Amino acid sequence: MTPRTLRVALTGGIATGKSHCLRRFTELGAPTIDADTLAKKAVEPGTDGFNAVVRRFGTGIIGADGTLDRAALGNVVFGDDEARHALEAIIHPTVRQSIDRWFEALDRQPGVRAGIADIPLLFETGRDKDFDVVVVAACAPATQKARLMNRDGFSEEQADQRIRAQMPIDDKARRARYVISTEGTIAETDRQVAQVWVEISGGT
């Protein structure tokens, strides 16, 4: 019988460098899956998720190209906890099922020791209990805020709203087996990612 694949979750906060860490894990040979990508697919035009979002939030969140206007939707949900939870209730079940099926497929592949799922709201949704190992990408809240404002063009208020919508990064770090600090250089972050993958995968 093929051994069960080690379930590894990569999480953190918005703008803490999760996506970069996931890319590095992938480049190192780790099987990876991204919940954000799955979430976008779950609300593509024509899907049940898209129709549910439009029913809940109205046609004002549909862009000129017929897809969801993510900026407009973000302005609604990050200023209203009830609205944000309603959106999550539409998207999260589909994403969760997709990730579960992905790990089940890895279980059937000989020689695959571990798979890594990038799940931003891992702790907020109680999903951490489903994983063997949790890795957190972390940086200071001030760094998160600066990245959101400089990289994404958010106002200070918009950046603060998005950071407050998630569990404080220090709390996530305390609950993780591994913490990758993204405060330093890219090379420093990459070295940490490589070391974590060696330990998880049993490599050298």
Image (tube, helix red, strand yellow):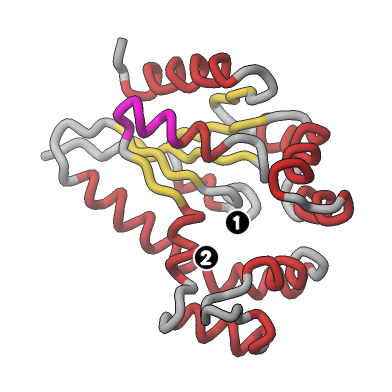
Which residue is at the front of the view, 155 or 181?
A: 155
Nearest to N terminus: mark 1 or mark 2:
2
- What residue is at 69 percent from the left and 66 percent from the top? 71
x, y (%) of residue 152? 70, 49
Q: Please name the residue that numbered disc 1 is placed on.
A: 125
Residue at left offset 76%, top offset 68%: 75
Q: Is residue 172 magenta?
A: no
Picture layout, residue 142 above or below residue 64:
above
| Residue 178 occupies quadrant | top right
- Is there CB contact under 8 Å for labels 1 and 2? yes
Q: Is residue 195 above or below residue 180?
A: above
Q: Residue furthest left?
A: 1
Q: Please state the total of marks drawn on the protein image.
A: 2
Residue type at the position of mark 1: Thr
Q: Magenta stretch?
A: 23-30
The numbered disc on residue 27 is none
The residue identified by callout 2 is 92
Vertical side of 187 occupied by 180: above or below: below
Q: Measured from the top left, where is residue 7 in percent x and y? A: 38, 40
Front position in the image: 8 or 197: 197
SS for callout 1: loop
Residue 172, picture quadrant: top right
Q: Position of residue 87 (x, y in %)?
A: 63, 72
Q: Position of residue 80 (x, y in %)?
A: 80, 70
